[in-house]
């Protein structure tokens, strides 16, 4: 992170920005404008292990390219542009996703400072070594009052744009998630002696449930549902399974639809268990609501997409992003860029040069559409106050 921040700081300065690091180590480049208000563009610079080149980084680079273009033409906007390169989105070291952006918006939880990495170094210590200030991390670094909004460019990390043959798309909402633990308990028994008619096989109940999850999610538009983990006890080839535990991950851009699917699946699990003389257990471990993107800012972004000659398609983001955090502070919008076969978190991550060009063109146009609104006194931030 020290190296990448140094390199990117240099590029920000070359593009005419004043550069600072905030209390947690987010890198902030500011291109002053004629007015007081600020439009923020950004994404993250950290990665997973064995990552690709574009997840996060692309959004920071597209933003810098837009500012570079303004700087080269000596153009000043009626507002300031800030490029924020968030310090820790993936949460690899401490298992905390959105660390940088949660501090930025003032949503950081103090108890996390005591978390330790694999070498026993606390988060507080790591922030201090990195040049940040763990004492003032809780207050955050940014006040939302003067923000016109936040716009993030990110690779799609899914195959939808490729299937539609589009270089870019506008995010409607970042999907909400339910994470659950589901268990079935029957009776273990001898694989050779217990007749089929009298068995209470927990794995057969779980198997029936897994296929029901697939069927139910296919019936509910926009839903994805995954059983990614299953464990069976006692776990021997000659013993009828007495217990089966599985994970369930449900996502949907619409919270009501996700909750409906969750409740229907619980009823189904109970029905399947009863029909097989088994018990079932249902544990909701985590519920994260969907984050809709700001409609005013997203409409501007759509206009910018259309003006570049590309049909504007709204899609939901199955992956989480810094924009979901920043949305609590300011109107937020996101532009997704097509990536090859949707592959991400993998060195094979790949984008086309032309698609990156399209994203830069859209963002330049978006910036000038925001300028028109500021000049007209109807800027997005002001609209928000009335809501
Ligand atoms: Zn990312």
Image: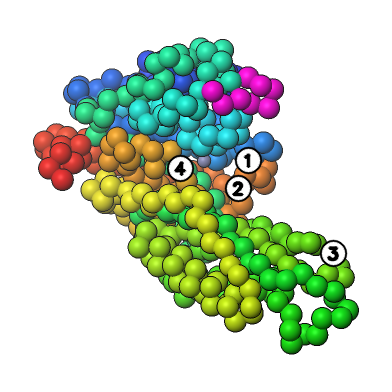
How far apart marks 4 and 1 lie (CA) works out to 16 Å
**Local SS, label 2:** loop
Residue drawn at x 58%, y 67% as measured from the top left: 280
Q: Is residue 31 above or below residue 91?
A: above
How far apart marks 3 and 1 lie (CA) works out to 40 Å
Residue 284 pos. (x, y %) = 49, 55
Mark 2 close to ligand 1, CB under 8 Å: yes
Residue 45 pos. (x, y %) = 53, 30
**Local SS, label 4:** loop
Badge 4 density bin: few <14, some 14–19, many ≥20, Cα 10 Å: many
The label on residue 52 is: 1
Q: Nearer the viewer, mark 2 or mark 4?
A: 4
Earlier-in-chain disc, 3 versus 4: 3
Residue 124 pos. (x, y %) = 52, 18
Residue 336 pos. (x, y %) = 45, 49
| Region rendered in magenta | 114-121
Labelled pair 2, 1 in contact (Cβ < 8 Å): yes
């Amino acid at each position: 992170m020290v190296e990448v921040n140094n390199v990117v700081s240099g590029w920000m300065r070359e593009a005419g920005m004043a550069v600072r690091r905030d209390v947690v180590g987010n890198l902030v480049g500011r291109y002053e404008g004629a007015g007081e208000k600020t439009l923020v563009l950004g994404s993250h610079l950290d990665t997973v292990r064995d990552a690709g080149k574009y997840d996060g980084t692309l959004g920071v680079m597209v933003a810098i390219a837009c500012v570079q273009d303004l700087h080269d033409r000596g153009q000043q906007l009626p507002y300031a542009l800030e490029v924020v390169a968030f310090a820790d989105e993936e949460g690899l070291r401490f298992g905390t996703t959105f660390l940088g952006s949660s501090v930025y918006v003032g949503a950081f939880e103090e108890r996390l400072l005591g978390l330790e990495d694999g070498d026993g170094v606390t988060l507080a210590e790591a922030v201090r070594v990195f040049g940040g200030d763990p004492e003032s991390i809780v207050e955050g670094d940014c006040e939302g009052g003067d923000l016109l909004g936040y716009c993030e460019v990110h690779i799609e990390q899914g195959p939808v744009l490729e299937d539609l043959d589009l270089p870019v798309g506008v995010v409607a909402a970042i999907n909400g998630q339910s994470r659950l633990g589901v268990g079935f308990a029957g009776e273990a028994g001898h694989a050779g002696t217990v007749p089929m008619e009298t068995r209470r096989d927990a794995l057969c109940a779980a198997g029936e449930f897994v296929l029901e999850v697939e069927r139910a999610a296919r019936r509910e538009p926009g839903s994805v549902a995954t059983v990614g983990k299953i464990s069976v006890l006692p776990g021997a080839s000659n013993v009828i399974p007495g217990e089966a535990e599985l994970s369930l991950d449900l996502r949907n851009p619409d919270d009501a639809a996700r909750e409906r699917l969750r409740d229907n699946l619980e009823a189904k699990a109970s029905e399947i268990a009863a029909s097989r003389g088994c018990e079932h257990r249902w544990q909701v471990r985590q519920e994260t609501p969907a984050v809709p993107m700001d409609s005013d800012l997203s409409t501007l972004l759509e206009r910018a997409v259309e003006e570049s000659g590309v049909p504007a398609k709204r899609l939901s983001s199955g992956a989480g992003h810094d924009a979901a955090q920043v949305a609590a502070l300011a109107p937020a919008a996101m532009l997704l860029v097509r990536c090859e076969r949707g592959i991400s978190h993998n060195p094979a991550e790949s984008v086309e040069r032309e698609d990156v060009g399209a994203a830069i063109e859209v963002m330049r146009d978006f910036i000038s559409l925001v300028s028109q609104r500021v000049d007209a006194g109807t800027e997005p931030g002001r609209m928000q106050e009335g809501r």
